Amino acid sequence: MAENVSDTPSMSDTRVGNDPRIPTVVADRVDIVYRVNGTGAGRGSATAALNRMLRRKQTEKASGVRTVHAVKNVSFVAYKGEAIGLIGTNGSGKSTLLKAVAGLLPVENGAIYTDGQPSLLGVNAALMGDLTGEKNVYLGGLAMGMSREEIKERYQDIVDFSGINEKGDFITLPMRTYSSGMGARLRFSIAAAKDHDVLLIDEALATGDASFRMRSEERIRELRERAGTVFLVSHNNKSIRDTCERVLWLERGVLRMDGPTEDVLAEYEAFTGDKSDKAKPKAAQPS
Amino acid sequence: MTQVLHTPPPAPVTAEDDLAALAARHGLSVSGARPSLPQYIRQLWARRHFITAFATAKLTAQYAQAKLGQVWQVMTPLLNAAVYFFIFGVLLGTKRGVPDYIPFLVTGVFIWTFTQSSIMVGTRAIAGNLGLVRALHFPRAALPISFCLQQLQQLLFSMAALVVILLCFGVPVAASWLLAIPVLILQFTFNAGFAMIMARWGAKTPDIAQLMPFVLRTWMYISGVMWSIDKLTKNHHGLPSWVNPVLKDNPAAVYIDLMRYALIDSFHSSQLPPHVWIVATGWALLFGVGGFIYFWKAEETYGRG
């Protein structure tokens, strides 16, 4: 059982030199480690901080710096035209792995090779609540590396897609005055306005009302047709089934399974007890 | 079922060199690797519109919630100048011996504030924007440069206020005012370079942001912002002879005095240190180029944990 789980089609194919498929992302035994400051026993107090500085050469725990091994020895190859789902319980390293593929987090060991620059679907951090929606469209677009002309060209599409102006001229109001749903819709619209070679999506499908969700799933499909490869992190097994044909299952930073969506999801659902009532105790059990 | 789940992860059996070779065969590049310096400069140039848009957005967002709005862009520097005038001009009487003391003081305060705040925002440029750094891909030098550009825009507002002050105090308009432009360009280059150095330090050790105000205040007092360095060193006879040139050749004093020379007619070239333009250009190039390379050297580490 364990063997046929681990031995994925993609892995065996890589050993054959004349594979017609074109790889876009190669993860080669990737380890990702976070270092967190200020977690010692006397957390936050001044004496503890002093202690930490004076006794540098201590064990990491005592010196107050803790390392979190978020992703452990993960290898996979993603090919052009694939849509790959990333699943796993909370804190299993999915988003971390995605950020490393995007080149936003350095890897501790191993390497990630990519074709072009993978982009994470997300511009939230570049936007400013005090600016109008209109200015934020430009700012977000520029932050993603679009040119002013490109943004001007797509500006109307972005606004129409977000549906911000359906209930009046809201795009000229500061973003902080938007409801959380409106803000999320505008953010998604800006982020989805650009075409990408490798697209990484982190739970973006859950924003907005039902009609907006339909539109955004439609948009994701479009992006996927134009993008080489799409990665999707989601806790929604239905949206994984709808969009992905291959799934990577991460658990505690370890790649537990890699294979066709149905096979992996079946295992995963059994693991989390999705279809039964014992969801919680089962998920908490392994150690 | 649980046996399956507890088995160790599927070990990549033959993956050792296969994966790296596969990546090489298809011309894939390492994700998040540091680009070469020319490549980095090209990327940065491609993002120039983002840099300016980000600076302008930050500037306008700053006073967006205030009732008086953008009026504060001019009010803040004027109030600053008023406070320093009250303390050093009225209370302490530093003005003795300095002609056109108020233009002298206000020019000093504004030019110094430009360098000081560029360094402060530079220190927080990466550490304070980790969200942005972790969400989007762009050459990270865009952040400190953009923040310094915001400070430059702020200074231009201050300069507008300064022109009003100069005219009020009867300083004549002169062709030498045009010298303000090269001075600002040199000072901006210096500031941006310094900000990039601080950004790298601040990214690794955020505590530096707590320390900088003290360092900067000391630097301000020895740079002749509120008084003339010449008068100060003349009054202390015990000082070694190298103190005066060292103080006057420090970058902050150089840019402040050059701006005073450009704007105030009673500030003569004899009050400037020798070869002042070469010194000013030297500081700008040393910090501008050096700071940029120093920042680029750690490009791939920004945003880690």
Image (cartoon, rainbow, N blue to C red):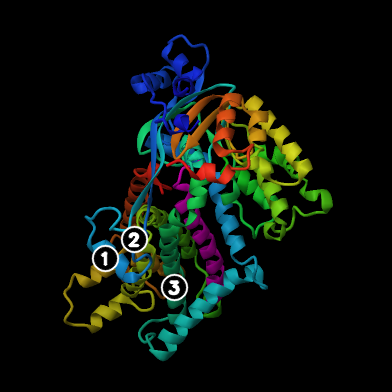
Dot 2 and dot 1 residues touching (CB under 8 Å): yes
Magenta stretch: give its range.
Answer: B137-165
Front residue (pair B51, A63): A63
Residue B248, given in percent of the width and then of the height, sits at 29, 68
Q: Judge whether residue A116 is colored magenta.
A: no
Residue at which label 1 appears: A51
Q: Of discs 3 and 1, which sits in the foreground?
A: 1
Front residue (pair A246, A207): A246
Q: Amino acid at mark 1?
A: Asn
Residue at which label 2 appears: A40
Residue B136, given in percent of the width and then of the height, sits at 53, 43
Is residue A93 visible in the rendered image? The answer is yes
Mark 2, secondary structure of its residue: loop
Give the label on residue A145, or none: none
Front residue (pair B28, B233): B28
The residue drawn where x is 53% and y is 64% is B154
User: How far apart are labels 2 and 1 at the CA level?
Assistant: 10 Å
Residue at which label 3 appears: B109
Q: Main secondary structure of the magenta part?
A: helix
Quadrant location of residue B202?
bottom left
The residue drawn where x is 47% and y is 14% is A13
Q: Amino acid at mark 3?
A: Val
Q: Residues within 10 Å of mark 3 (few under 14, many from 20)?
A: many
Label 2 and label 1 in one chain: yes
Q: Which residue ends up furthest to the bottom in the rendered image?
A: B91
Residue A233, given in percent of the width and then of the height, sits at 57, 37
Q: For this view, does A192 lie left or right of residue B204? A: right
Chain letter of mark 2 equals: A
The residue drawn where x is 52% and y is 70% is B173
Mark 1, secondary structure of its residue: helix
The residue drawn where x is 44% and y is 67% is B111
